[in-house]
Image: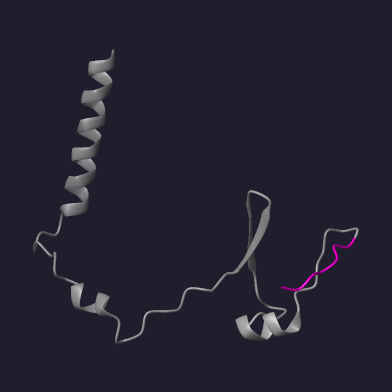
Amino acid sequence: MKAVKVTSKGQITIPVEIRVALGIDEQSYLEVSEDGQEIRLRKIVPARPLGSEDPIWSLIGAGESGLGDVAVQHDRHMAAGELDRWRESS
């Protein structure tokens, strides 16, 4: 365990060996949270773009109905439901 000093602006220096081990550099963002009497830091890892090997690609089109107006009909159905709830509450 390393001890670090807090500056008057609330800043600390993360020891170099920890930064190297976690790949933290001047472009990194850290999540700061409180847990009782502890302050926790966690490196925020940016989302990676989907690669061609990702299994999600095999699901594309798996739920196709062949209907072209599904979104329009869905919106009408939702609007009708909202009107029914409004009428019941009046």
Residue at image location 61% in from the left, 81% down from the top: 22
Write the start and end of the magenta stretch as one range.
Answer: 1-7
Residue at image location 20% in from the left, 40% down from the top: 76
Name the image colouring.
Answer: one colour
Q: Quadrant of residue 25?
A: bottom right
Describe residue 45's horizontal placement relative to residue 30 as left or right: left
Residue 87 image offset from top left, x and y in percent: 24, 18
Residue 48 image offset from top left, x and y in percent: 45, 78
Residue at image location 42% in from the left, 79% down from the top: 49
Q: Residue furthest top?
A: 90
Residue 10 image offset from top left, x and y in percent: 83, 58
Q: Nearer the viewer, residue 76 or 6?
A: 6
Q: Quadrant of residue 67?
A: bottom left
Describe residue 42's horizontal placement relative to residue 2 as left or right: left
Which quadrant is the N terminus positioned in? bottom right
Residue 47 image offset from top left, x and y in percent: 47, 73
Q: Nearer the viewer, residue 10 or 3?
A: 3
| Dominant secondary structure of the residues highlighted in magenta in the image | loop
